Image: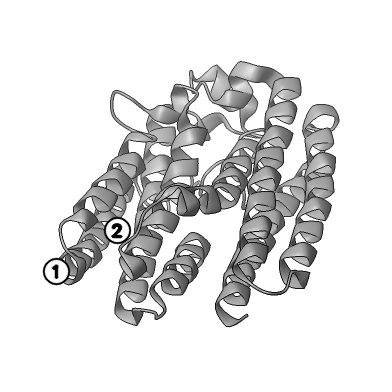
Amino acid sequence: MLPVIVGTAWGAHAAGAIDVTAFVLALLATVLVHAGANVINDVGDDSGGTDRQNDGRIYPYTGGSQFIQREIIDSRGMAGLGAGLLMLAALAGLALLILKGPVVLVFGAIGLLLAVVYSIGPLRLNSLGIGEAAVAIAFGVLPITGAAWLQSGIINSDVIVFSLPVSMYVAAILLINEVPDLRADGATGKRTLPVRLGLDGTSFLYFGLHLVATGAWAWVASYAMNESDHSIVPGLALLLVVFLLTIAGRAAHTIRRKADDREAMTKAIESTLAIHTIGSILLVACVLYMHWF
């Protein structure tokens, strides 16, 4: 939900008004695609054997839902559920197509494609070491630029840079969530970045993602200051983002030194989720600040 809210705020500011119908439909479509992708990922991890032997999962953050393994629903039923969620997302997309025109097809097609090929089919992006990048696009750049376009009809370099903090935070969530699953993923040929890089490399990459997010945030704060007569809100937001970077540094240390400590890893995962949430809310706050002041 947060990327759609962030992108809608930017687009509504650019347009000078908010299209509530487009916002609600975009929110619905994105939530359904995300839910469908998660369900389909469970199917892919079951067929690959990953979830069946994952005894290091940290509930409820890693290792899938375990619905198939606990026989709550079988693999075929899970696949049907995922397909149904994506079909509902497509219906919301069809309504947006009627409302806003054919450009919606581009956003919708990319979103649905990434939701499917991330975990199933011959590509299985999550096994090629590019699943993290796909998620950054699917739940960062894509919904933010798409929601902004739905409101304003504009896609430019400004909104793409504006989307980078959320994109990096989303990639960091997936990356740290893959750490407890590292052994099971490696044993079943699911070559995620933690499997490929090891704990040290994953720790550096995790912190690097947050550094990129902070750099993009500096641009956002500068942009907001230039757009208004005051600088206090963007300045305070940037200070808070720098503080979030220190939290990310502690989580990176946990990945490198305490990956087997379930309590420490749980706190690190929850910190990463909090960074994403707080950072997204701050982006909306900066846009509202620009709009009102």
Q: Residues within 10 Å of mark 1 (few under 14, many from 20)?
A: few
Q: Where residue 220 is drawn, which disc sits there? A: none
Give percent across and percent down for residue 163: 52, 52
What residue type is disc 2 on? Leu
Query: Does 215 appear above or below 86?
Result: above
Q: CA distance from mark 1 to mark 2?
A: 20 Å
**Which residue is at 15% across, 57% downward?**
102
Drawn side of residue 133 relative to residue 272, left or right: left
Q: 159 or 89: nearer the eye?
A: 159
Whichever of callouts 1 and 2 sits on the residue coming sooner in the sequence is 2
Q: Please give the residue where the numbered disc 1 appears in the rendered image.
A: 98
Quadrant where the C terminus lies? Answer: bottom right
Q: Secondary structure at mark 2?
A: helix
Drawn side of residue 76 relative to residue 45, left or right: left
Give percent across and percent down for residue 92: 24, 66
**Which residue is at 78% across, 36% downward?**
252
Query: Does 109 appear above or below 190?
Result: below
